[in-house]
Image: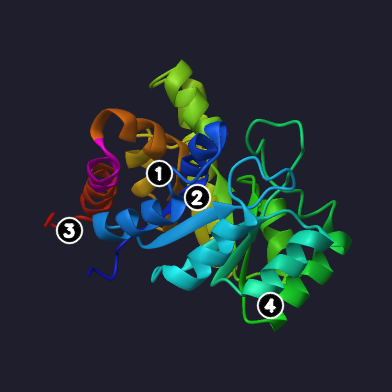
Amino acid sequence: MSKNHLRLGVNIDHVATIRNARGGRHPDPVRAARMAQQAGADGITAHLREDRRHIADSDIERLVKDIELPLNFEMAATPEMLAIALRHKPHAACIVPEKREERTTEGGLDAVGQHNHLKSYVSELSAAGIRVSLFIAADSTQLDAARHLGVPVVELHTGAYCEAAIDHPGGVEERRELDRLVKAAAHAHRIGLECHAGHGLTYDTVAPIAAIPTLVELNIGHFLVGEAIFGGFDSTIRRMRALMDKARADASGERSA
């Protein structure tokens, strides 16, 4: 594996969304996690929401117990989610903003305004040996606040870039949002933060993000699960993995495998 390898975290939330539409056990998110590993994923992401709209408590229990890949547990900064994380001790916990009425995570966490609230959560998770990250906007002020909170990792919200790339491909807004992500990733690297990114990435939008040299990991879920309807989960992940690898190799001047 190249030292320039860009990790792929596969979010399996919406496998559980489909299961929950009719109840029962099919499709199984843990089976999806195993398939993701075989297809080239480097980690699994699962978001246990307050309303349990997709991932359930039993899914987290099984994922921690049964999968070999590192589990990234997405969670709101609430006492309930803290207790669950401390009980299961996943490899990583990414603190995300969460509102009950939202369809998906809208924007990044306010690490500046919520500094005092977040501090105890970061401290307790870190003390338990869990690698803590914050899901934030591509903004230097937010990155500095994350660094001050003592987290080793941040994940940049790529939603605005993806929307601009779809609505106005090649336009000024797309270039502006991409430049914001490039600068934020570089700033994170300068201040000692490992930088990840995710939200809304597709086959059409992933390459410019994968080419950012200071990004270490991309987390992708909804698109992969949706595209799997047409092409299968295994081949969908493999194609995304290949697009990421090509973009990173092209950007660094390496010869693609």
Please say if 81 is above or below 169. Answer: below
Q: Earlier in the sequence, mark 2 or mark 4?
A: 4
Looking at the rendered image, the disc whose residue lies closer to the viewer, 1 or 4, is 4
Whole-Å distance between the Cαs marked 3 and 2? 22 Å
Residue 11: x %, y % from top left? 47, 49
Q: Secondary structure at mark 2?
A: strand
Q: Earlier in the sequence, mark 3 or mark 4?
A: 4
Q: Secondary structure at mark 3?
A: loop
Residue 189 seen = no
Q: Report the residue marked by disc 4.
A: 126
Whole-Å distance between the Cαs marked 1 and 4? 28 Å
Whole-Å distance between the Cαs marked 3 and 4? 36 Å
- C-beta proximity under 8 Å, tags 2 and 1: yes
Looking at the rendered image, the disc whose residue lies closer to the viewer, 2 or 4, is 4
Q: Residue at x 27, y 57 (%)?
A: 40
Magenta-tinted stretch: 232-238
Q: Report the residue marked by disc 3.
A: 254
Q: Secondary structure at mark 4?
A: helix
Q: Earlier in the sequence, mark 1 or mark 3?
A: 1
How many other residues sit within 10 Å of disc 4, few (<14), some (14-19) or many (≥20)?
some
Please say if 62 is above or below 159. Answer: below
Residue 114: x %, y % from top left? 84, 54
Outermost residue to the right: 116
Whole-Å distance between the Cαs marked 1 and 3? 17 Å
Q: Report the residue marked by disc 1.
A: 209
How many other residues sit within 10 Å of disc 1, few (<14), some (14-19) or many (≥20)?
many
Please say if 61 is above or below 165. Answer: below
Q: Quadrant of residue 88?
A: bottom right
- C-beta proximity under 8 Å, tags 3 and 4: no
Q: Earlier in the sequence, mark 1 or mark 4?
A: 4
Q: Is residue 108 magenta?
A: no
Give the main secondary structure, helix, strand or loop, of the magenta stretch: helix
